[in-house]
Amino acid sequence: MVFHSVVLDDEYCKGCTNCLKRCPTEAIRIKNKKADILKERCIDCGECIVVCPYHAQDSITDDLRDLNKYKFNIAITSTTLYGQFPLDVKIDRIYESIKGLGFNYIYDEGRAADIIALTFNDILEKGTNNFPLISSLCPAVIRLIQIRFPSLINNIMRVESPMEIAARMAKKEVMNKYDISSEDIGAFYLTPCPAKYTSIREPLGIKKSYMDGAIAIKKIYGDLVRNEKKISGECGFSKGSSKGIGWSRVGGQSMAMGIKKYVAVDGIGNVIKVLEEIENENLKNIEFFEGYACVGGCVGGPLNVENPFIAKSRIRQIYEDNEYKAEKSKEEIEEYKELFKSGYLSWTEDIEPRGALKLDDDMFKAFSKIEEINKIAESLPGLDCGSCGAPSCKSFAEDIVCRGANIENCIFMIK
Amino acid sequence: MNNSKDKNKIKLEYSIISNDFKRAGETSSNIKSILKKVGIDNKVIRKVAIVTYEAEMNIVIHSYGGNIKLMVEGNNIIINAYDKGPGIEDISLAMKEGYSTATDEVRELGFGAGMGLPNIKKCSDYFKIESSTEGTRLLIKISF
Ligand SMILES: Nc1ncnc2c1ncn2[C@@H]1O[C@H](COP(=O)(O)OP(=O)(O)OP(=O)(O)O)[C@@H](O)[C@H]1O
Ligand code: SF4
Ligand SMILES: [Mg+2]
């Protein structure tokens, strides 16, 4: 992978070890008192952004200036956005505030979630060989599987994420309504998530994303709040159902789709534990696994503003109030099922394993490296203190054998 | 862990302690992570993971303790699981899907579906089981 949304700002980095230990793929090292991300291992989950006390880890996304590139701009609203405002701020008012930023049209990601939910039985029928089916919603989880659990790639459902489906449907809808050609339309995701921004630039399962960019929610939040205070009217764009909006919290997908045998897990460390179980075939009787890198689900996405638990509670209330019905006619349901059958909602490309853990192309050489690593690791104190710049003594031993690290970087090895 | 010094050979050996539920599963997950680092094909790793996990759990749950050895030779992964008894009374019964002598306590931990041995066999290209009161021995080959 060439592009990563998660980046480090050297100026703020103090070289502390907070991010070092939290990285689920052990992708961070501290070199010369600054953190450094091993690109081939980064899954853009944003754990480091959340944990950095100095705000040195950040995420690249687009900004409002990028709207100038297009004649007609669509905001695709992540459903987490509705959890960022008190519930008495109506979604229609949020939409009106978004329009004030320069957008011409709004398409709710929850509408795409509804479409996936409607076709889920067809998806289940197609994917029955590998249980549980793993949700494709969280790209950080997919990338984690590519690196740490490649044997589970075939369990991932080959359906686009709601974000991507929303971009496609939104452009289609706009072109039907207005006389405008696709090059003139810009679709921008209002994103809680660096991993999804990376997926726009470096898509998973498709050649090219229909999304033209994404803007971090926290970048526009201030403007939205100010606009909301000023506006008089509301604007009515279609919304997803309450269930579709509920997808932004852990468990939301399974609940919306009425799946009984599901496991829903949030937080990348917990996701890893469950993927281990799936790999050991201990969850064969489960139909569906929804895993989120972030605590609480996407409501805990690092580019949100609101406290994840408060946002989660609001989304839960929207789900439970069930105010937004978004009922579909028979024709619409048929149309969606057709879309699924035609492959329009599905991945076209295979997800490849990312051999970032492999130590050598030659199996036997790789094995002798493992032996050497184990030998060195045994000679280290086993405190996992992080002073050497590696997340654990074991990974430091690996750095010595494979990345030319010097054993004297261990403060206990200096004679 | 006790690894060989030969070049062009991969040899792993782990001892498994009876009733040690704290460490149970560590051997198979260790093997899994080594095979990932070595770059063995995912489908093969998955089979090896299931075989070693089930064999490990059987030793922990049903035996007095034993060990698991894994070797890579040519295009084969050879797995030896061995324990010190008390052995399996009726092997053909034990091989049946759903047959289990697991206690209620063990079932509460989520084991005892009687699927371990049948799954091991399903994942193997070659499978042999021998048992007496002296112990139980599994020999498994998985080709890649
Ligand atoms: N190493 C062993 N020593 C003694 N008895 C064994 C051993 N392995 C299996 N058995 C016997 O064979 C039975 C079937 O084993 P199997 O692994 O198929 O199922 P299980 O261990 O009972 O349940 P599961 O593996 O699904 O959790 C066991 O219940 C036990 O009576
Ligand atoms: S849980 Fe949601 S916000 Fe967090 S990384 Fe995954 S998709 Fe992004
Ligand atoms: Mg068993």
Image: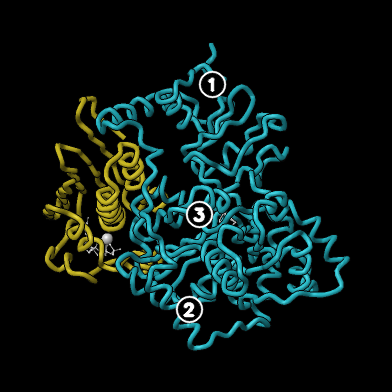
Residue at x 17%, y 59% (from the top left corner): B121
Q: Amino acid at mark 2?
A: Leu
Front residue of A97/B3: it is A97
Sequence-wise, the earlier of marks 3 and 1 is: 3
Q: Colour of chain A?
A: cyan
Front residue of A399/A181: it is A181
Q: CA distance from mark 3 to mark 1?
A: 35 Å
Q: Chain of mark 1?
A: A
Residue at x 57%, y 20% (from the top left corner): A411
Residue wearing tag 2: A118
Q: How many numbered discs, if any? A: 3
| Disc 3: residue Cβ within 8 A of ligand 2's nearest atom | yes
Looking at the rendered image, the disc whose residue lies closer to the viewer, 1 or 2, is: 2
* Residue B12 located left or right of residue A198: left
Q: CA distance from mark 1 to mark 2?
A: 56 Å
Residue wearing tag 1: A410
What is the crowding at mark 1: few (fewer than 14 residues within 10 Å), some, or many (at least 20)? some
* Residue A80 sits above or below residue A238 on the image: above
Q: CA distance from mark 2 to mark 3?
A: 22 Å
Q: Which chain is yellow?
A: B
Residue A212 numbered mark, or none: none
Residue A163 at what x, y percent from top left?
55, 62
Residue A125 at what x, y percent from top left?
34, 74
Looking at the rendered image, the disc whose residue lies closer to the viewer, 3 or 1, is: 3
Q: Are marks 2 and 3 on the same chain?
A: yes
* Residue A404 located left or right of residue A236: left
Residue wearing tag 3: A139
* Residue A320 sits above or below residue B38 on the image: below
